[in-house]
Structure formats: structure tokens, C-alpha cells
Amino acid sequence: MSMASCLNQIKPKMLVFSHICSPRYVTGAEKLLLFMIRELLPFFSCTLVVPTEGLIAEQARLLGIVVIVQNIPLIVPLYLALPHMSNEMDESMRSPEWKALLLLIHHEGPNVILTNTCVHPLPAIAAKSLGIPVIWTVMEAIRETPHTAMSVAIFERYSDFIIGISETVLLPFRTATLLPKTTLIPPSWDHAQLNADTWPEQRQIRRNQLGISDGHKLVGYISSAIFEAKGLEHFMMMALSVAEQFPQAMFLIVGNPVDNDYFERCLDHARNQQMMDRFRWIRFEEHVETLYPAMDILVVPSVTIEGFGMTALEGMVFGKPVVVYGSGGLSEIGRATGNEAFIAKTGDVDGLFTRVSSLLGDDRKLNDVGTHNGKISISTFGIAVYRDKLRKFVDALRVQQYPSFHLVRGNTPLVYLYEAGELRPFVTERAFLLGGYQFEDVHQVPDELIDGLPHGAPIGEPPVQRMTRRKRRGTQKGTRFRLKKAMKKRSKSHRGGIRRIQPKRSRRRRKTSRKRRGR
């Protein structure tokens, strides 16, 4: 057995559930989850569960992480705090995927389960029903609706620990009962993997590919998936105003359009003003170290409440001035890094224009802000800070052994003994007690798990059924009734009428007649 195998046996087992696994690009939530798994490897033997094959699965395998592909329904209304969230969860728990999830968890036998994002509650519900502790990582802000409290109550019921990536996402959980469960661990990165010594070369290569000269100032926009909430249209309107005032300004859009109609509508702003030659567009790339160096300014105009805003932090890590809308986590990053001056009110396109213009009009300011961001991003959000927070969380984590399901029952009183991979039902209470078992040791599990596991031979003999005199009478009466009915069916028609075959009188009636004759 290898040293790695020995260590994996010593470390507690963590089963990690990713809500998606995109085959084309890695979303922010996937990226942060994979980073967390990598940092947890010194403490846990991690297995990643993904719904389909995709990039995050490939990257996990390269890290030596076991990957299981199994589809699990998502509950989007939980994140949107819609009134039908409970109905959708109940419906999903009647699906074959729910039963398969229970069997997967039971087969893997983890010490702890980690489920990712607000739309992925089923792994948490399944784990709690099996007595396994749950870590729920929250990467997005639950929508504020009249039903937000209902959504939060589900997290409270099915989690033991909640990790939030920002104060914004943890805000609904800052209640008296949930506060002890919550931990703030902002995202980070491994600076060594960004190959900082290659940035000048990467800048020149990328700008040559884009046709951007040294005299140009490149203003960038990055989103792995481009849709309306990511504010591309606001970027376009800001960019056109900047382009009129600064002839040296060029603009780069990086991302994969999710809504093509919306994407084309955004580009129409430039087309209508005959300015498409000032814009470049490339699809999102995983190797961000080849993209950020080419830019001079990064703009993150999200019009939704961002859980964190990793794109903005990455821009700072690469030493770029970053202008953002003050939505959720983006505002937190700006304040934590001393960039309050570059936070515009959400939806204020003129505010974006003013801040970008102030940088383009002052080269010294542009360089100073970029240098400041490169340093403070590391001291505030660097990997050393991240690992310290994560280590403290792991130290406080009460990891218990996977519960030994020796005695179980479903929603019925029938108790089973689980051994050798089979469930053996106790035929009687006496058989249960004779085995030396106690009812307080019986663990209730979902019926789907009872149905899904193999069933073995029953334990104990069924009780002998003794007939009372009344029962025997009832049996005889029933026999006479069935006999009488059967004989009626044998009746045949005769000369247009019905010929009836009369049954013989019972033995009891014959005895009575003899007594009467004797009198």
C-alpha cells in the first residue's frame, strides 16, 4: 500500500457535492469550490460528486481527487426565496435521483459532507437523515423576498456549519440561532501558480494578438458567462462615452454569451455609433494569467448582488485599477482594499465613466493605484490569510465517524439489523430483545434507503397462531358459505326454470332433529 493510500485511510473522509460541472468553462462557484477542496486535502480524504463530466471534474482528477458522476436535482427556488421551494424539494425527494443519492452516501460512508451553493440542498438533507454532519458553503446572496426566512430556515435545519465567502452572503444567517454555525472565509488564490515573472511577456503577446499598440489603454470586462445581470450593456454605454473623450482607449470583452440576443443588443450600441473597431471580444479562458496582464483597467459592472466578485479581486492581484458597481461583495472588496473611490453606485453608468476617465487622464494615478492593488490584495486576501482561516475552521470542526447503522427502521415500526450489506428484519419484538438489542439504539432512516438496500433472511420465528373456538366457528361458517355459493353456481336451467341443488343439512342440525324425534 502506498504512503498516499495510508494517509487517506487516516484522514476523515469528506464527500463534496458540486451543483454543476460545465463542459465549456469553469464558473466562479466551481473555481472557488475546487480551490477549497485543494486546500482541504491535508485534512480530509476528499471525493467530489458532480452531475456530469466537465472541466472541474478533469481538474479534480489531475489533483488526485476521486470524482463520482451522479445527477442530483437542483432547487433554484431556495436561492430565489420563492414560495414553492418546499414543494419542489418534496417532489425531488420522490424521484429516483433521491433514492440514488441516499444509496451513494451510504455506500461511500463519509465522515462529513460539504455541499456547494444555495441551489444544492438535497445532499445536505440526505446527509442529515443519515446522521452525517453537513458543511454548507454559501457563495451567493439569497434573494430578499417575503419568503427569505423560509429559505434560511432550511439552511438552519439541514446544516451543522455554514461557510460564507462574504458578509453579504452571510447576512441572512446572522441570527441568534444560526450565528454560531457561520464562518467567514473569503476566497483566495495560489500566487505561485500565476507565474508573475511571465506577465510582461504575456501582456505583449496578447496585445499583439488583439491588435493593441503600446500607446493604447485597454479597458477590460471579464465574465465567464455573459448574461444581463453581469452588466455588459452598462459597460458598453460607459465605453462609448470614454471612447469619445479618449482616442487612445480600446475595449476588451472576455466571456461566453449565455443569452445571444442580449449579447448582440449590447454590441449594437457600438455598431450604431460606428465604433466596433474600438472593441475586441474573445471567449473566456481558464488561463487568466494571459488575459489580465494585457489590460490597463478592469471594470466589473454587475447589476446583481454579487456574493463576492472574484473577477475584481483577480484584477487587483494582477496590479490593475478596478472600477466596480457597489453591489454586495464587490463593495466589500473595494472597502477592504482601500478602493472606495472606485466604487460607483449600482446602475450609475456616469459613475463608471467618471472613475475610468480619472484614471485614463492621469498615467501616474493609474500606475499608483495598480501598484497599491497588487500589494494590498495579497496582504488582505492572500493564501496565507485564507489558510489561517481555514485551519481554524477545521480545528473547530467536530468530525464524527460515519454512524454505524447496526439497527435501523424506516417510517414503520419494523426494525432491521444491518450486517454484511443486507437488512434483516426482526420478525417479533421477542426476537429483537433476545438478541440483546435496545430500542433506543435504533436509528431512523428514509424509507428510500430501506427499499434500496438488499434484504436478507428474517430474524426469529413468526408466532404460532392458535385458533379460539370463536375463530373456528367463523372458519366453519365461512366454509359453509363458500360451499353454498359454489353449489349455486353449478345449478342448471331445466325446462325454462331453475333447478336448484339443495346442500345437505349440517351435522349440527341433524343432531338437533334426532333429539326432537326422541321427544
Image (cartoon, rainbow, N blue to C red):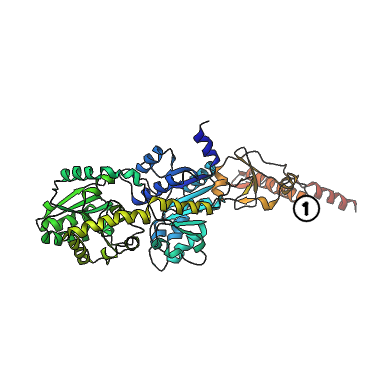
Q: How many marks?
A: 1
Q: Nearer the viewer, residue 278 or 248?
A: 248
Q: Is residue 431 left or right of residue 124?
A: right
Nearest the viewer among 215 and 278 is: 215
Answer with the quarter of the image where residue 504 lies.
top right
Residue 216 in the figure: left or right of residue 393 = left
Residue type at mark 1? Answer: Arg
The front one of 283 and 503 is 283
Whether 306 is drawn above or below 457: the answer is below
What residue do we see at 46% from left, 65% from top?
174
Residue 122 location (% of width, % of height): 47, 52
Task: Look at the image and tell me in which quarter the C terminus lies.
Answer: bottom right
Residue 13 percent location from the top left of the image: 52, 44
Q: Is there any visible trace of residue 285 in the rendered image?
A: no
Query: Could you say where residue 178 lies in the image, as x and y percent from the top left?
Result: 50, 63
Q: Is residue 410 visible?
A: yes
Q: Residue furthest right?
A: 519
User: Label 1: how many residues lie within 10 Å, few (<14), some (14-19) or many (20+)?
Assistant: few
Point out the residue furthest to the top here.
Answer: 1
What kind of element bears circle 1?
A: helix
**Relative vertical location of residue 179 with respect to residue 127 in this rendering, above or below:** below
Task: Identify the residue under disc 1.
Answer: 470
Query: Which residue of the protein is positioned furthest toward the left in this rendering?
Result: 274
Q: Position of residue 144 (x, y in %)?
A: 38, 66
